[in-house]
Image (cartoon, rainbow, N blue to C red):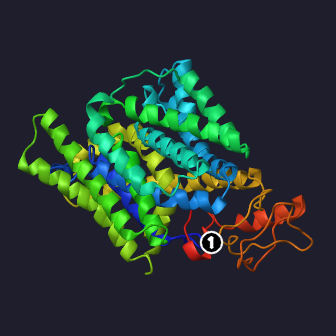
Amino acid sequence: MPDAPPRRMAWLDALRAVAALLVVYAHLSHYLLRGARDVSAEWLHAGPAGVMLFFLVSGYIIPASLERHGDLRRFWIGRLARLYPLYLVVCAAVAVAMPVPLTGGQMIAHLTMLPQLLGAPLVTPVVWTLGFEMAFYLVVAALFALNWHRSSATAAIVLAVAGVVLAPLSAHAIAAPPLLVAVMLAAGLVALVSRRRLAMIAGAVVLLALAGTLLVAGQDRSHVWDGLLIPAVMFVGTTIYRAENRQIPKYRAAAAAGVVAAALLVNWFAELVSLHALTPRYMARSVITLLVIGGSFAIGMACRHRRVPRRLAWVGVISYSIYLIHVPLIGLLAPALTTLGDRLRGPVELFAVAGFLGLLLGLSWLAHRYIELPGQRLGRRLAPSQRLAPGLKLAPGQRLAPGLKLAPGLKLAPGHRLAPGEKLAPGPGLATNEDDADQQRKHRDAAEEQAVGERLRVAD
């Protein structure tokens, strides 16, 4: 079993693994382990628990990634290189193996990675979550450009309140044309990464308006009750990150988490009322599901300085591949899985489950090794060199990322200065030419994802 890449936060990989396995169980148990599902489904929503845990981890990670880069262009190149290659390959493979007729507009909707928020039929069901990931990236990047990125707790609370108030109104209240959304998205991103202040502000406003409109009025009916609460959960992860790193008081993070948790329960209970199913058992299931989400993350944080089981961390490393591949694989094997589920009972059924998981993990490792990692390496090669931009200075309390310093012979351009008392961290110099940059990129490629400095040690 290969080791987890160095300098990663293994506890977050372990949480990704738990989230991925919960989602796989939720889908596989329609075919195998149906007896276990009949019991567990009465007390736990395994799929939503796993997905919300993924969102909580993403909310913790993304601001750290953005602030490590300190540059929106590097951030977006890194994010797109991280997500798009496997996403496009899986969508294309599913479209070929299980033909799904898509119009030109629906194909564009998938290319934006916002198909569910644009009302397009999904090539494979699990990609709905990526639309919320993309919307969260748009909001976070826009807030960063506007220098509002420290308002994570406020964002979480506002989204939670809006999620409760607007839930009955958000199911496809608008039908946004995919081509128009794609044009606005492209224009907003180009402006956002232009490094020209006025253009960045304009791009941030466009992207905030786009993401906000889609989240408020573009929800699919299946997510009318939790659509706005998903980014609220992600911002809770962000507030936890900020509180842990003393950027905000801990009571603010606790308040945001409490408000979002209460909003989730309110909307889940409201959904039960709409289904005429508000029974004590289903209310208890909602509470237990919420406790599994928050409890898993709390246990992960409590154990963050302890050794994490290597196999669990490895599953977390390939969890993105597991997530995207498992539903198409279940669909492909559905006839055989149904037959096995009908014929096998008791412990013998576990052999079939082990066989499926072995196949899934093998395919996911191959996808990670030959699709995800090359895409990430390409992203690092395309990203601009990490150096101080003209006119930029380090704020009090900030340092250049550990391991970086000004290369010999490199001078600060006019307008550059370090804040009083600042110093440059020891280590390899910043690249001064393309050859140096290539050497640094080769060194960085030894790890799948870079840490957010020695102090934070957070992977993208």
Q: Residue furthest top?
A: 103
Q: Residue 46: x percent and y percent?
A: 27, 52
Q: Quadrant of residue 287?
A: bottom left
Q: Residue furthest right?
A: 409
Residue 214 percent coordinates (x, y): 44, 32
In the orientation shown, which residue stands out farthest toward the left?
280
Residue type at numbered disc 1: Gly
Q: Residue at x 58, y 22 (%)?
A: 179
Q: Is residue 101 above or below residue 40?
A: above
Along the viewing direction, whichever of 437 and 84 lies nearer the viewer = 437
Q: Residues within 10 Å of mark 1 (few under 14, many from 20)?
A: some
Q: Which residue is mark 1?
A: 453
Disc 1 secondary structure class: helix
The answer to whether 350 appears left or right of 108 in the picture is left
Q: Is residue 399 left or right of residue 5?
A: right
Q: For this view, does 327 lie left or right of residue 36?
A: right
Measuring from the top left, give residue 386's x and y in whole percent. 75, 61
- Work out whether 351 lies above or below 280: below
Of residue 143 and residue 106, the one placed in the foreground of this image is 143
Residue 360 in sight from this viewpoint: yes
Q: Is residue 200 left or right of residue 247?
A: right
Q: Quadrant of residue 460?
A: bottom right
Residue at 24 percent of width and 61 percent of height: 291
* Residue 356 in the image, given as x and y percentages of width and height: 39, 52
